[in-house]
Amino acid sequence: MRAVLRRAISGQRCDVVTGAVLGAAHQVGEVMVPVLIGVVIDQGVARGDLPALARWLVVLAAVYVALSFSYRFGARAGERAAEKAGHALRMELVERVLDARGGAEKGRLPGDLTNTATEDAKRVGAVNMSVMLAVSALMGILVAAVVLLLISVPLGLVVLAGTPLLLYLGHLLSKPLEKASEDQQDRAAHSSGVAADLIKGLRVLKGIGAETAAVTRYRITSGDSLAATLRAARAEALQTGLVIALTGIFIAVVALVGGRLAASGEITLGQLVSAVGLALFLIGPLEVFAWVNAQFAMGRASAARIAEVLAAPHAIAAGTVEMPSSVRGSLTLRDLSHDTLKGVDLDVSPGEVLGIAAVDPADALSLLRCLGRTTTFEGTVELDGIALADLDPAALRDVLLVADHDADLFEGTLRENVGGEFPEVMAAAGADEVADELPDGIDGRISERGQSLSGGQRQRVALARALAADRAVLVVHDPTTAVDAVTEARIASRLRDVRRDRTTILVTTSPALLAVADRVVLLDGGRVTDTAPHADLVRRNATYRTAVLA
């Protein structure tokens, strides 16, 4: 937590220092206003000296201009530091979440991570503004105390003794707010995550008639979030109210002491006016400290959440072997075991189109995780004789792509989702028909997650994107389950041509796709139980016929 806060502040030190200096100048100017008013009274009004009155009024106007510009540019520097720090944290969080080694998403819903990268990053970034204002307010209090000491030692001592006590009490009062704020952010993030999860699965929920249960679940989660928000608001209101009350008592004491000194003749009328003005001025800096304590409390809670994500252990280790400049695309699996897989042995030749039919869908998913290197496993998987575990995950994905069955599309044009204009690829995936159905063709807009398309259209666009990536090894999982039989047959007939001379693995039970493979591997019970061309397996293997043709 502290490391996150330190980075957020030190990374913007130039703007923070600039803002603090200009803010301090503004506060000094604010202190000088009541002092100059007292001088105007003593030097001009009390003596009836019009030239002196005019001179001091000009000085007072100049101070107003200076403090105005100081505040303007100081606040600008502080806001810039807050926004830049929040942006830097968001980028750091996104980089961690997208790290090829994974792990940051474990145990967290997507909405939770989104909330951390937005609201929490914003709150931590705002600490920069709090630091700037705290330095400014402290400077104002110190200068006011010095001026009061020059006017009267008792007045100055009251301020010097009372201010640290108020600051300490404000810090103690911020502790419950910090805890309430952390609970609020946790529950708000969970509520966002549940909402995102429900929206993602909206079609499925409607299909099974589970809308009522989903609404009930979200209502409970949202209610918990609302209760936590109200608790945090009450804690903040209590903290602010108590600090303001203590501040009012403090100011009343300062005014009382100053009034008694004026009544006894120890200070002049102008000095009394200055003292009362300074006492009223002190309300501002002390209220700033109350606000700063609240912001720091919320910033610490958010920093703890950010630190938890950044420190999340990686799901897989980084590789130590560099990727060869030329990849042939051969794969070798030896005694591969993971989840439902039990000692799988398999050889894939460079440029081969291999079909893998899994009787149990869990076997297919386990194999995909191993080939994509998104998990740890027993045994070995080698690419051109190099173990995948020794290769950097990001570099591996530049040559080996695992295209998931439920790959998401992004909001934007069809061209942007595919990655460019590839007529041969679009035709092979059947995505050219999708383009024909959009008003603007390949430049037609697609909504978030491809919700504006049908299931079959989304699959064809996702397949086109995978083919356009042109990886040396491509693994696709059930790419045509939502398309009609005619379109599926057309995709199967064109797939070999667009992937010629490159290794392609089709993990599917589609007979149309398996028929175009050089050979098919049957996974049954987590093991390879048979290998042959599709037609031979259909003729001789009853388990294969049931899995593929039933």
Image (cartoon, grey):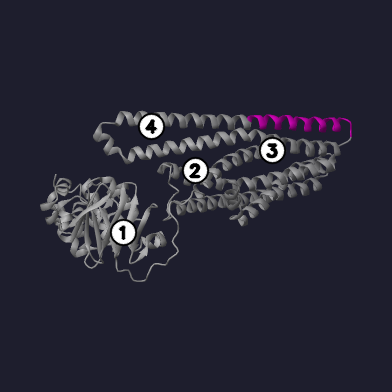
Helix, strand or loop at mark 4: helix
Q: CA distance from mark 4 to mark 1?
A: 44 Å
Quarter of the picture holding the C terminus = top left
| 1 or 3: mark nearer the eye | 1
What residue is disc 2 on? 119
Q: Amino acid at mark 1?
A: Leu
Instruction: Check residue 218 in the rendering and tell me which mark sits there, or answer none.
Output: 4
- Mark toward the start of the polypeptide (2 vs 3): 2
- The answer to whether the residue labelled 1 contacts the one labelled 3, judged by CB atoms less than 8 Å apart, is no
Is residue 430 visible in the rendered image? The answer is no
- The residue range painted magenta reads 241-265
- In the rendered image, the residue lying farthest to the bottom is 325
Q: Position of residue 275 (x, y in %)?
A: 79, 37
Vertically, is 490 above or below 455? below
Q: Is residue 137 magenta?
A: no
Q: Quadrant of residue 130?
A: top right
Q: CA distance from mark 2 to mark 3?
A: 27 Å
Q: Main secondary structure of the magenta part?
A: helix
What residue is disc 1 on? 333
Helix, strand or loop at mark 3: helix
- The answer to whether the residue labelled 2 contacts the one labelled 3, judged by CB atoms less than 8 Å apart, is no
